[in-house]
Image: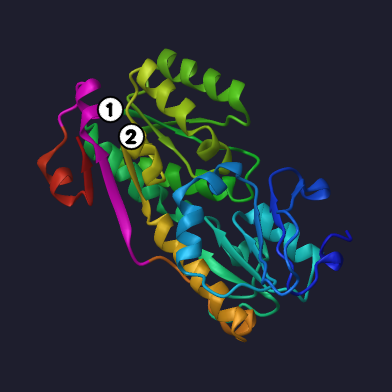
Amino acid sequence: MQLFDQLRRREFITLMGGAAAAWPLAAHAQAPKNIPRLCFLTFDPGTLQSNRFDAFFQGLRDLVALIFAGSPPAALAAKSATGTIPIVFTSGADPVALGLVASLNRPGGNVTGVSFLLSFLGPKRLELLAELVPNARRLAALINPTLSDAENQLGETQDAANRLGRELVVLKPRNQNEIESAFTTLSSEQVGAVYITPDPLFLSRKNDLIALAARHRIPAMYFDREFAAAGGLVSYGPSLLAAYRQAGVYSGTILKGAKPADLPVVQPTKFELVINLKTAKALGLDVPPTLLAAADEVIE
């Protein structure tokens, strides 16, 4: 792969989407050579149009050559392509298990970043969903089987359902058609509520998932505030804006001379519970006062 060999230290190239074997390349118009430039690599095209992109640059001031990888596949592809250009990633999966870094405290090599811990919050999300819909004896989880940590997500979610005394129906959609089929199955199986697990596919189909949940009148728990803000019932997870801002701060720190190997992988300390009260009312749900009191944000 010759792409990164062609990057000069002060060039800015924006890379996004597609398979790692053939990344589409979208470069800005030519600029004077003395202008610092940055490589922003993401497999989610929506990132560049979202406030996550803005949050990243809030933490970044002086730009020179480095790679920002906004998803585990992007980070792994970047790492396989270069062992010298600094890489800053954001990841909802375990970066150690993925092989991105040697350890969280001492990453080693040319890679460091921010871990959202999205996939580790499944039990808490299921617990909150059960509290929100207490009469739902059958819960469901949508898990993309192509994810590297899909089995871990499944195991943790199943264990949580067992502790709650709820039956768990697991569906494994891999594309838009299978997502639509999954909701049809949820209705026929008389599932009381569904947990949408962390996944770039599900994030990219945010509006479709929200619309399907509303059409089938199924309460749904999501992993990112963007879902609740767009009309989803409830979300619980770390602040992605804060995480992207920290990624920007780390990028700036590296550009000032720090080595990725010396910068521990940052983990979130703040988690947000967001409840869309308008959606709850449309579903005929009475949100327990304890949940309303615990919510970081209530959308009316």
Q: In this view, does 29 lie above or below 37?
A: above
Mark 1 highlights which residue? 136
Q: Is any part of residue 104 visible from this angle? A: no
Task: Inspect the image, locate mark 1, and give the three-letter code of the amino acid beneath it.
Answer: Ala
The question of residue 274 being in magenta is answered with yes
Q: Position of residue 264 (x, y in %)?
A: 53, 78
Name the front one of labels 2 and 1.
1
What whole-number distance in Å separates the C-alpha atoms at marks 2 and 1?
8 Å
Task: Residue at 52% x, 22% y: name it.
Answer: 182
Q: In which quarter of the image is residue 292?
A: top left
The residue lying toward the viewer, choosing from 266 and 103, is: 266
Task: Residue at 68% x, 53% y: name it.
Answer: 73
Left-right relation of 25 to 116: right
Find out whether the residues at labels 2 and 1 contact each other: C-beta distance under 8 Å.
yes
Colour scheme of the picture: rainbow
Q: Give the range drawn in magenta.
A: 269-286
Please state, as top left, top right, bottom left or bottom right, where the C terminus lies in the image: top left
Q: Which residue lies furthest to the left in this view?
A: 289
Mark 2 highlights which residue? 166
The residue lying toward the viewer, choosing from 40 and 166, is: 40
**Comes first in the chain, label 2 or label 1:** 1
Task: Residue at 51% x, 43% y: name it.
Answer: 154
